[in-house]
Each structure stands twice: as structure tokens, then as C-alpha cells.
Image (cartoon, rainbow, N blue to C red):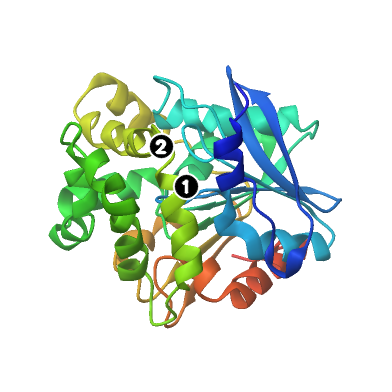
Amino acid sequence: MTAPDSTASVVRLGLPGGKEVSHRDVAANGARFHIAELGEGPLVLLLHGFPQFWWTWRHQLTALADAGFRAVAMDLRGVGGSDRTPRGYDPANLALDVTGVIRSLGEPDAALVGHDLGGYLAWTAAVMRPKLVRRLAVSSMPHPRRWRSAMLADVRQSARSSHIWNFQRPWLPERALTADGAALVGRMIRDWSGPRQPEDEAIAVYQRAMSIPSTAHCSIEPYRWMVRSMARPDGLQFNRRMKMPVRVPTLHLHGSLDPVMRTRSAAGSGQYVEAPYRWRLFDGLGHFPHEEDPVAFSTELINWLKDPEPDR
């Protein structure tokens, strides 16, 4: 179902500098997904994290298009302008959303770039559908097996991820996220950022997007699955499946001051990559390096994408 006009006005935004971006819906994996697209060339598909939507990649869309890529940022299931389905928020299905969008765009493969939850899904897609993933770039998120072990065995990481534990309660997290014009979203983004704080106007954009009906619930559902499935057969099966190594060149980006995901938790994900793996730590940046220092982030990403033989 196409986003209603009220949702479209919140989600279908322009880019900095007034640059035109193409908005449309594509069908994939039994749902419809909103995408923002700019440029021509090899496909780079950008996957946002929590509590954001496609607009978090506004700077990278322009940079990638200028560098000769077809840059596409999608709204994940249940967020932004994409369908809010009653179910389907486990990582395996969400990863099939991603690879389904690649096929719907008429491309043989894509370089996947994911932040936070989008990074978790990018890791997953690279394992589940390796032929559709040309390269993998992940920011602020360890490999799913590293994430699971850190949440269970590292007290400090567990404390930093207190919001995920809080999401396990019924209904209350949704109400908290949307109360007072989604004020909690603003506090989260500010608290999780480094010294380079976001502008009030950007915060307001994310607050309006979270206030779209059902978005808060759909945004939380993946985290509920990730925790509640830890001891269930479906979660154990997913964890075993993720033992299969990633076999495409991988760039792993992380902010040294990330208060949500410890550097120690993210580092070491390379053990699951049987291909060139590059780790890049951004000094002085927090959980949103692509927004806190978009020039440095985009430069690192584009140089790596254009490197024909990225080293380990």
C-alpha cells in the first residue's frame, strides 16, 4: 500500500542544497518499500538504523551520486514510507526485504551499507544471499554473533544497550517513543551522538517520522525478536546460520565515542569474514558517524568502494 499523503509529506523530503532526489515505492518480499534514489552507476543500497529512516543518508546520497554510483536509501519494513505489516520483523525476513529490493531495482547485485539495525541486516543479507551482495559496509554494529555474545556476556555492553532490554515490555516503549511529540527520539539521538551534536531541525525530522502511526511499534519489533529469540529454536537456528562466513570485501566503520555499542563489541567481527576486511575507527565520533562527520564518512566509504583490491 502506497504511503498516504500525510505520511508522504513527512517522509518524501529533499536533500541538502535543494538537490532533487527521486522518491518511489518498490515491491519486494510481499510488501512495498519506499526508496529515495539519486545518481547512475553501480548500485549502493543504504540501510538506516534506529530511530531513523532513509533521510539519515541524505549526505551520502549526494556524495555517492557525485562519485558515479546509483545511490538508493530504503525505508525498512514498518518505518518511513514503507508498509507497516503485522509481522515479518525477524532479521532473516528483513534481510530478504533488502535483497528483494535489489532485485526489484533490476540490478544483479549491490554494495550494502548499513548503520545500526541496518548494519545487522546487511551482515545477515551478505550471509543469506551472497550472490546479491557485491560489497558490505557496516557502521556502528557488530556481526550478529558478536552482538549476541556481547549482550549476554559483557555487562558493560548490556548496560549500554539498556534501551533494547526496555523494549521487551509490551506497549509501554511505544508510548514512551511517541509521547510529547517523540521527545525521547530527540534525547536518544543527542545522547548517542558525540561532541558534534545534530541540529534541532534534523531532530525534528526524526521526531515527526516516529510519530507516524504504528512506526514506534514496528521500529521496536526487530529488537524484541533479537532478545526474545535468544533461547528459542528460531533464534538458535539463526545464530547457527550466521556461522557461515561473509565472503565479500567488508568495510567496518565505528565511532570511538559510541555510547551505545562498545568498540570492543564491534571489533573482532572480522573473524566472520573470509574476504578482505577493513576496520576504520573514527576518533571523536559517536553512534552516528555518517551524520556527525558526513564528509569523512563518505570519503572513507567512496574510496573503499572504488578500490579494486581492498586489503585486509
Place of residue 195 in the rendered image (x, y in percent of width and height, measured from the top left): 39, 82
| Residue linked to disc 1 | 209
Q: Which mark is residue 109?
A: none
Q: Give 190 or 288, whichever is nearer the viewer.
A: 190
- Identify the secondary structure beneath mark 2: helix
Kindly check if marks 1 and 2 are in contact, taking CB atoms under 8 A apart as contact. yes
Which quadrant would the C terminus be assigned to in this image?
bottom right
Place of residue 304 in the rendered image (x, y in percent of width and height, measured from the top left): 69, 65
Q: Is residue 265 above or below residue 37?
A: below
Q: Amino acid at mark 1?
A: Ala
Classify mark 2: residues with Cα within 10 Å, few (<14), some (14-19) or many (20+): many
Q: Residue at x 38, y 32 (%)?
A: 214
**189 left or right, relative to 149:** right
Quadrant assignment, res 5: top right
Place of residue 278 in the rendered image (x, y in percent of width and height, measured from the top left): 56, 65
- Identify the secondary structure beneath mark 1: helix
Q: Amino acid at mark 2?
A: Thr
**86 left or right, relative to 246:** left
Q: Residue at x 64, y 46 (%)?
A: 12
Classify mark 1: residues with Cα within 10 Å, few (<14), some (14-19) or many (20+): many
| Residue linked to disc 2 | 215
Tell me if I can see residue 57 in this picture: yes
**55 left or right, relative to 170:** right
Q: Is residue 44 above or below residue 15?
A: above
Tell me if I can see residue 261 in this picture: no
Q: Give 146 or 90, whichever is nearer the viewer.
A: 90
Q: Is residue 65 above or below residue 74?
A: below
